[in-house]
Image: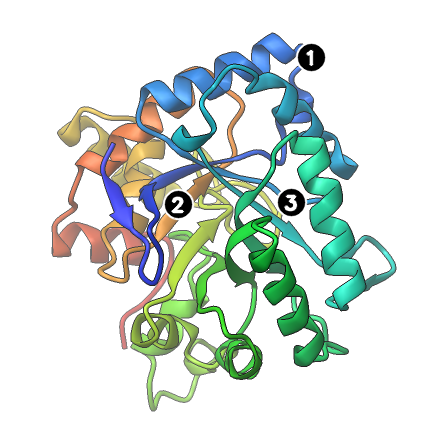
Amino acid sequence: MKNLKIPNSELEASKIALGCMRITELKEIDEVRDLIDIAMEHGINFFDHADIYGKGESEHIFGKAIDGIAREKMIIQTKCGICPGVCYDFSKEHILKSVEQSLKRLNMDYIDVLLLHRPDSLMEPEEVAEAFDLLEKEGKVRYFGVSNQNSMQMELLQRYCSQKLIINQLQFSIAHCDIIDSGFNVNVHKDEGCVRDGSILEYCRLKEITIQAWSPFQYGFFEGVFIGNEKFPELNKLLNELAEKYHVSNNAIAIAWILRHPAGIQAIVGSTKKQRIAEICKASEIKLTREEWYALYMAAGKKLP
């Protein structure tokens, strides 16, 4: 597994991270521990959580499963700010309470990275800044970032926060890549040319903010995966051909497509299958050619203007 140095931090993170949203699907703590062990054996050192995953149970199970693993060998990230079905909440009180609860469930003294999960339109950035300052001062959070935010939302928050925002977690895959579609279709009068995110890809590159790709196998907002999906025959044909060429799985090629981008994107993989994780980890060793990268993009149904 190849690592990436996350700018504005001391973090040397694996290019592929294990997303822990679905670990509650595993029946036994030992199964979760086996999954973590396999991930770490293949070079994954970054684990992504959120306070709402499994209604908190994912963090709780993870905290039990990692008993005996040296804390410094792991980079732990969690998210807060979503009150499911009610609101988004970036208030100082909510952030502090969420972190305390996450630390308790994870059975840890500190979190490496805290992300604000989905934008809160009622955000008062001064309150967020106060919460970040307190969490940093108390040693409970080392670094901060956001999830699913556009460039101006980040710019507003950064104006008040003394800490650099180091990560923005965004949905990104071959079949769900609005953040690059608009870049291809500049000055073209069609839907793909609409800039809906404030040119977030370019913004993050300029500000040295690491983009994390969530749902890297999805083709819509939880509509389904494109791997093996009859809706994407050309894409799957090419994925399989490249998998054979590079002697890896088609899943690994889909991740290699993300890692090929020069923005230095980190892929968040949420599988609970040990063999699949082991196969996907090979993606970090593959560098697709420019022609292969573009061919996959177009095989997903995209057109270059």
- Give the residue at mark 3: 50
Where is residue 272, by image quadrant? top right
Please name the residue that numbered disc 2 is placed on: 267
Residue assigned mark 1: 27
> Helix, strand or loop at disc 3?
loop
Give, as a three-letter code, the residue at label 1: Lys
State the image coordinates of residue 172 (x, y, percent, origin top left).
44, 55
Cα distance, mark 3 to mark 2? 16 Å
Crowding at mark 3 (Cα within 10 Å: few <14, some 14-19, many 20+): many
Between discs 3 and 1, the one toward the N terminus? 1
Q: Which percent across, then down, holds residue 58?
A: 68, 31
Q: Which of marks 2 and 1 is nearer the N terminus?
A: 1
User: Residue 27's image quarter?
Assistant: top right
How far apart, in angstroms, are the residues tagged by discs 3 and 1?
Answer: 20 Å
Residue drawn where x is 42% and y is 52% of the image: 173
Mark 2 Cα-neighbour bin, 10 Å: few <14, some 14–19, many ≥20: many
Q: What secondary structure is found at the residue carrying circle 1? A: loop
Locate the C terminus and report the quarter of the image it occupies: bottom left
Left/right placement of residue 24 relative to residue 237 reads right
Seen in the picture, residue 276 relative to 237 is either above or below; the reply is: above
Q: Is residue 68 above or below residue 48?
A: above
Name the quadrant containing residue 274: top left
Q: Is residue 119 left or right of residue 76?
A: right
Amino acid type shown at disc 3: Ala
Residue extending furthest front?
137
User: Along the horizontal axis of the image, is 15 left or right of 291?
Assistant: right
